[in-house]
Amino acid sequence: MRTIRFFLPAALYYGLIYFLSDQPQIPISFVFPLQDKFFHFVIYAGFGVCLLYGLARIDRLGTRRRLGTLVVIGVLAAGLDEFHQAYVPGRNADIVDAAADVLGILAGWLIVRLLIRSSAGRRWFSAGSESPPRLP
């Protein structure tokens, strides 16, 4: 149960995603094509980093299981987000948005892998942990 606290950042981050998804329109000026897909990708990359912060503390998960768990949670979160948006006036569900979300989750995994390889990233990612982080 002690590891649950390490998932608090991911829960709060997903709460922010839910809040943003609940808005009928988000006033963002159009700058380039597929801009909304880029935003989905970036936002979910942050969510992936937050999820891995918690998953890295579960000892029984090896690297492959950790990545698999991340992908399953990412697909479920993206699907839930798109399902929710289907019922928000002014929004719509889009499978391409969900794909951008899942790709963002995988980008978050890559970011964490690169961070852990640096000593500063290793210190940041292992803050509050009794043992050094394992590569996710």
Image (cartoon, rainbow, N blue to C red):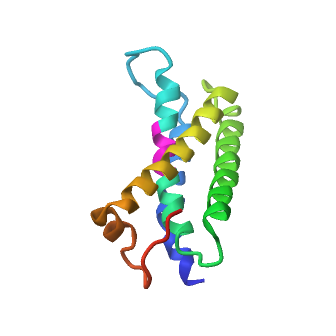
Q: Nearer the viewer, residue 33 or 68?
A: 68
Side of 122 relative to 22 (left or right): left
Q: Can residue 39 be seen by looking at this rendering?
A: yes
Q: Position of residue 25 (x, y in %)?
A: 50, 26
Q: Kindly give the residue lying farthest to the front in the view shown.
A: 117
Q: Quadrant of residue 86?
A: top right
Residue drawn where x is 37% and y is 16% of the image: 31
Side of 91 relative to 7 (left or right): right
Q: Position of residue 100 (x, y in %)?
A: 58, 33
Q: Position of residue 76 (x, y in %)?
A: 70, 49
Residue drawn where x is 53% and y is 68% of the image: 54
Number of marks in picture: 0
Find out whether residue 23 is within the magenta segment.
Answer: no
Q: Is residue 1 above or below residue 7?
A: below
Q: Nearer the viewer, residue 45 or 36?
A: 45
Q: Kindly give the residue lying farthest to the left in the view shown.
A: 120
Q: Nearer the viewer, residue 74 or 117?
A: 117
Q: Quadrant of residue 24?
A: top right
Q: Position of residue 15 (x, y in %)?
A: 53, 53
Which residues are drawn in magenta? 42-47
Q: Is residue 40 above or below residue 75?
A: above
Residue drawn where x is 61% and y is 27% of the image: 91
Placement of the N terminus among the 4 image quadrants: bottom right
Q: Can residue 93 be seen by looking at this rendering?
A: no
Q: Is residue 95 above or below residue 62?
A: above
How would you classify the magenta stretch by its main secondary structure? helix
